[in-house]
C-alpha cells in the first residue's frame, strides 16, 4: 500500500500544468471521482497535501482520498473542453463521490401522487419510480413552500396535511376547517372536477420548473463565457438534475382532458374574453430573439384548431436596421408577413398574438398603418403577469391560470419563443463555424462567442481598437494586440 501511495505521489509530480480532466480510481479500478482542472498538477496535488484545509474539513473528501489508488488524466485544449468532457465522463461512469456530493445539496421536489383518487401535492427529497409525477428540484425551500400555499388558494388542491372526507353521495369534502373559504373552487366536489384542478396546478408547476431551467442554463453560459468554469459546472449539474425531473403533463386519462374538444373549448373561451366574432381557429404569434443586441431574429408560428401547423412557420432576420430594438423589429416582421399576404390576396389569421406588452403591440399596429390595411384581431401576451394587452383603450386582462383560453395563448407564445431561440442559436453557431477567427491560433469557441456577441460581426471587430477588445472577459493585452494585427493583415503570424 505504501509503495502504491509513493507511486501515486511520483505520478502527481509528473502531471502537466495544463487544463484537463482527472479520474480517481479505487483498488478495484472503479472510477470513484471525476474532476476538471485549469491546472491539472496544482489541482490534483491539492488533494494529497496534509495542510489543505478543504480536505481536512470535509470527511467525505478525506475518505475519498484514502481510497484513491490510481489517477488518470485527459488533457484538453482549454477549460471549455474540460468542462464538457467532465460532464460526459460523469454521465458515463456515474462515480460514487460525484453523486454523493450532488446529493448532499438535497434540493426539494414536489411529488404528485396521480395514482390516487384525490392526488395530493407533497414535498420530498428523493425521486422514486413509483408512478408519481415529480417537479423540481427547487433550491429555495422557503419559496417553494410559499408557492404551494399560494397554489392551494388559487387552485383548491390538497397538500400533505389535508384529510378529505367522503360524503354519502360520492363527493368529497376536501377541507375540514374554516380555511376552506379562502381556497378556490367548492369545498365539496367530485373526483373528476378535483382532477381538473390538479391538471391546472401541475401545468403551473411545470412552467415554474421550466422557467428556472432556462435561467440556470443562461447562468451556465454566462459563467462559461466569463471563463468562470467552476461556477459554470455548478449550474450545468443543477440544470441536468432539473431537466431529468421535469415531466410533461400530457396525460390522456379521463381525469386530465387533453382532447380536441378541450382545445376547441379553449378557442371558444378566447372568443368570449377577447370579444371576437368567432373562435380563433387560426392563430399566428410573433416573437423577437437576440443576444445582447446582436443576432436579432424573429419567429412566426401558426396554430390551426389549437394544433401547431409547422409547415407554415416562418423565421426572419432583421433587415431595416442594426442593433437591439424590439419595437422596430416587431414592426418590421409584422409588416413583412401581412404585406406579403395582402399582396397575394391570402386570408389573414383569426387572431394575431404578439409576445410582449404595450410597446410591442403598438409597433405591430403601426405596421398595419404603414400598409394602409385594417389589422385582424390582435393582442399581446406580457410575460410578467401573463396579462393580455389590447391595441385599443381596453384595460389589460389577467385570466385565471386554469383558464382554457389562457392555456391556448401560452402554448402558442411558448412555441414562438422556442422557434425564435432555436433560429438565434443556429445563426450564432453558423457564424462561429464560418468565422475567420477559426484561423487565429489560441482562440477557442468560448472567446469567439464573447467577441462576436459583443461586436456583432467581423467587420465591427476589425474597426475596434486593441483597447476595446481587451475590455472583454478572457482577452488580455497581448492577445488583443495579436488579434488586431491578424484582422488588419488577414493572416495569423
Image (spheres, rainbow, N blue to C red):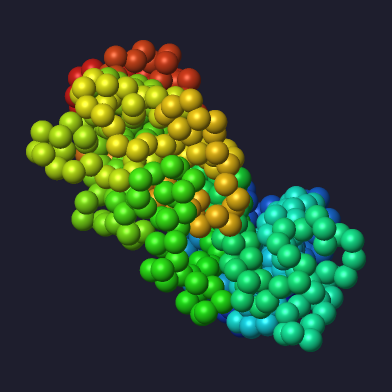
Please identify the quarter of the rendering in which residue 438 is found: top left
Front in this rendered view, residue 45 or 362: 362
Residue farthest toward the right in the current orientation of the protein:
177
Residue drawn at x 66%, y 78% as measured from the top left: 191
Front in this rendered view, residue 492 or 84: 84
Please identify the quarter of the rendering in which residue 462 is found: top left
Image quarter (top left, top right, bottom left or bottom right) of the C terminus: top left
Residue farthest toward the left in the current orientation of the protein:
344
Residue 131 horizontal side relative to residue 217, left or right: right
Residue 191 horizontal side relative to residue 178, left or right: left
Residue 75: give x, y in percent of width and height: 45, 55
- Number of numbered discs: 0
Residue 159 horizontal side relative to residue 30, left or right: right
Residue 40 visible within the image: no
Residue 396 horizontal side relative to residue 440, left or right: right
Front in this rendered view, residue 340 or 216: 340
Residue 394: give x, y in percent of width and height: 50, 30
* Up/down of 339 relative to 307, above or below: above
Residue drawn at x 45%, y 66% as measured from the top left: 262
Residue drawn at x 34%, y 26% as measured from the top left: 365
Front in this rendered view, residue 464 or 265: 265
Amino acid at each position: 500500500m505504501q509503495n502504491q501511495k509513493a507511486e501515486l505521489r511520483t505520478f502527481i509530480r509528473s502531471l502537466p500544468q495544463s487544463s484537463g480532466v482527472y479520474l480517481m480510481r479505487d483498488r478495484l479500478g472503479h472510477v470513484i471521482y471525476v474532476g476538471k482542472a485549469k491546472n491539472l498538477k496544482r489541482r490534483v496535488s491539492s488533494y494529497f497535501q496534509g495542510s489543505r484545509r478543504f480536505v481536512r474539513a470535509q470527511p467525505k473528501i478525506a475518505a475519498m482520498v484514502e481510497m484513491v489508488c490510481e489517477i488518470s488524466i485527459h488533457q484538453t485544449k482549454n477549460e471549455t473542453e474540460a468542462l464538457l468532457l467532465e460532464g460526459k465522463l460523469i454521465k458515463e461512469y456515474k462515480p460514487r463521490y460525484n453523486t454523493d456530493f450532488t446529493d448532499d445539496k438535497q434540493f426539494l421536489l414536489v411529488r404528485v401522487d396521480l395514482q390516487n383518487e384525490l392526488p395530493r401535492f407533497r414535498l420530498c427529497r428523493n425521486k422514486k419510480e413509483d408512478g408519481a409525477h415529480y417537479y423540481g428540484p427547487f433550491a429555495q425551500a422557503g419559496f417553494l413552500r410559499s408557492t404551494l400555499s399560494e397554489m392551494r388558494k388559487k387552485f383548491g388542491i390538497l397538500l400533505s396535511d389535508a384529510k378529505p372526507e367522503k360524503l354519502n353521495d360520492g363527493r368529497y369534502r376536501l377541507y375540514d376547517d374554516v380555511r376552506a373559504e379562502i381556497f378556490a373552487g367548492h369545498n365539496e366536489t367530485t373526483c373528476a372536477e378535483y382532477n381538473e384542478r390538479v391538471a391546472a396546478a401541475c401545468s403551473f408547476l411545470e412552467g415554474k420548473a421550466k422557467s428556472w431551467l432556462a435561467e440556470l442554463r443562461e447562468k451556465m453560459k454566462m459563467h462559461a463565457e466569463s471563463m468562470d468554469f467552476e461556477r459554470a459546472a455548478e449550474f450545468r449539474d443543477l440544470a441536468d438534475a432539473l431537466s431529468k425531473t421535469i415531466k410533461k403533463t400530457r396525460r390522456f386519462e379521463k381525469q386530465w382532458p387533453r382532447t380536441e374538444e378541450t382545445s376547441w373549448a379553449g378557442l371558444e373561451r378566447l372568443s368570449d374574453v377577447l370579444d371576437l366574432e368567432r373562435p380563433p381557429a387560426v392563430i399566428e404569434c410573433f416573437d423577437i430573439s437576440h443576444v445582447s443586441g446582436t443576432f436579432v431574429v424573429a419567429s412566426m408560428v401558426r396554430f390551426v384548431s389549437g394544433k401547431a401547423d409547422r409547415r407554415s412557420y416562418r423565421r426572419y432576420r432583421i433587415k431595416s436596421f442594426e442593433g437591439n430594438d424590439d419595437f422596430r423589429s416587431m414592426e418590421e416582421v409584422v409588416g413583412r408577413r401581412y404585406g406579403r399576404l395582402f399582396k397575394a390576396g391570402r386570408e389573414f389569421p383569426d387572431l394575431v398574438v404578439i409576445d410582449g406588452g404595450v410597446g410591442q403591440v403598438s409597433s405591430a399596429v403601426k405596421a398595419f398603418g404603414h400598409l394602409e390595411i385594417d389589422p385582424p384581431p390582435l393582442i399581446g401576451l406580457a410575460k410578467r403577469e401573463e396579462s393580455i394587452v389590447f391595441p385599443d383603450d381596453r384595460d389589460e386582462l389577467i385570466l385565471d391560470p386554469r383558464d382554457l383560453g389562457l392555456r391556448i395563448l401560452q402554448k402558442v407564445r411558448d412555441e414562438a419563443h422556442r422557434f425564435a431561440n432555436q433560429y438565434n442559436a443556429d445563426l450564432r453557431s453558423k457564424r462561429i463555424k464560418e468565422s475567420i477567427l477559426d484561423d487565429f491560433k489560441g482562440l477557442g469557441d468560448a472567446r469567439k462567442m464573447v467577441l462576436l456577441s459583443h461586436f456583432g460581426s467581423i467587420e465591427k471587430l476589425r474597426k475596434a481598437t486593441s483597447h476595446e477588445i481587451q475590455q472583454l472577459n478572457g482577452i488580455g493585452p497581448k492577445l488583443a494586440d495579436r488579434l488586431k494585427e491578424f484582422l488588419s493583415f488577414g493572416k495569423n503570424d
